[in-house]
Amino acid sequence: MNHAHPAPVVRQLTPRQVSQSMGEEPEIKLLDVRTPAEYEIAYISGAILVTDEQVQDILTTWPKDACIICYCHHGIRSQRACDFLQAQGFRNLANMVGGIDAWSLEMDSSLPRYRISGE
């Protein structure tokens, strides 16, 4: 019989909850999983743009209980990133619902909103 513990559920946080968490826990890692071109348009201060090299660093050097919040444009790619990290053994993960688009609407209207062709 398999007694493996189920993987913890990836938390879904609103931009306001993310902002609150970042203020309360400075060790939170905020990962931007968008493209460098999207990052140039708008980014959240303190976020880490995740490159292929960065992924290897995260997988090999970050503690599995590191508090990681992922975001993208609308929250879909970041959910995939959370699922990937969870499969690699990370246990303290959250996805920012609505992505940077929601952050711009709810938290920082100075961030430009944008569209990606095909969306």
Image (cartoon, helix red, strand yellow):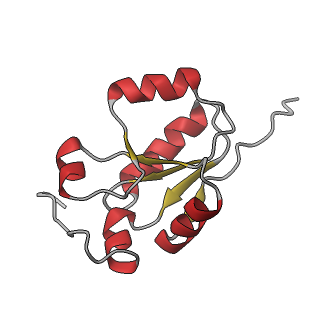
Left or right: residue 42 versus residue 67 is: left
Residue at the image point whose x is 25% and y is 69% from the top? 111
> Which quadrant of the figure has residue 6?
top right
Task: State the count of labels.
Answer: 0
Residue at the image point whose x is 81% and y is 33% from the top? 4
Residue at the image point whose x is 57% and y is 54% from the top? 94
The N terminus: image quadrant: top right
Q: Nearer the viewer, residue 118 or 107?
A: 107
Left or right: residue 76 versus residue 114 is: right
| 41 up-or-down from 50: above or below | below
Q: In x, y percent, where is residue 70?
A: 47, 50
Q: In x, y percent, where is residue 63?
A: 65, 30
| 33 up-or-down from 95: above or below | above
> Which quadrant of the figure has residue 56?
top left
Q: In x, y percent, where is residue 80?
A: 44, 46
Q: In x, y percent, where is residue 87?
A: 58, 34
Left or right: residue 58 versus residue 65 is: left
Residue at the image point whose x is 21% and y is 70% from the top? 113
The C terminus: image quadrant: bottom left
**Farthest left residue?**
117
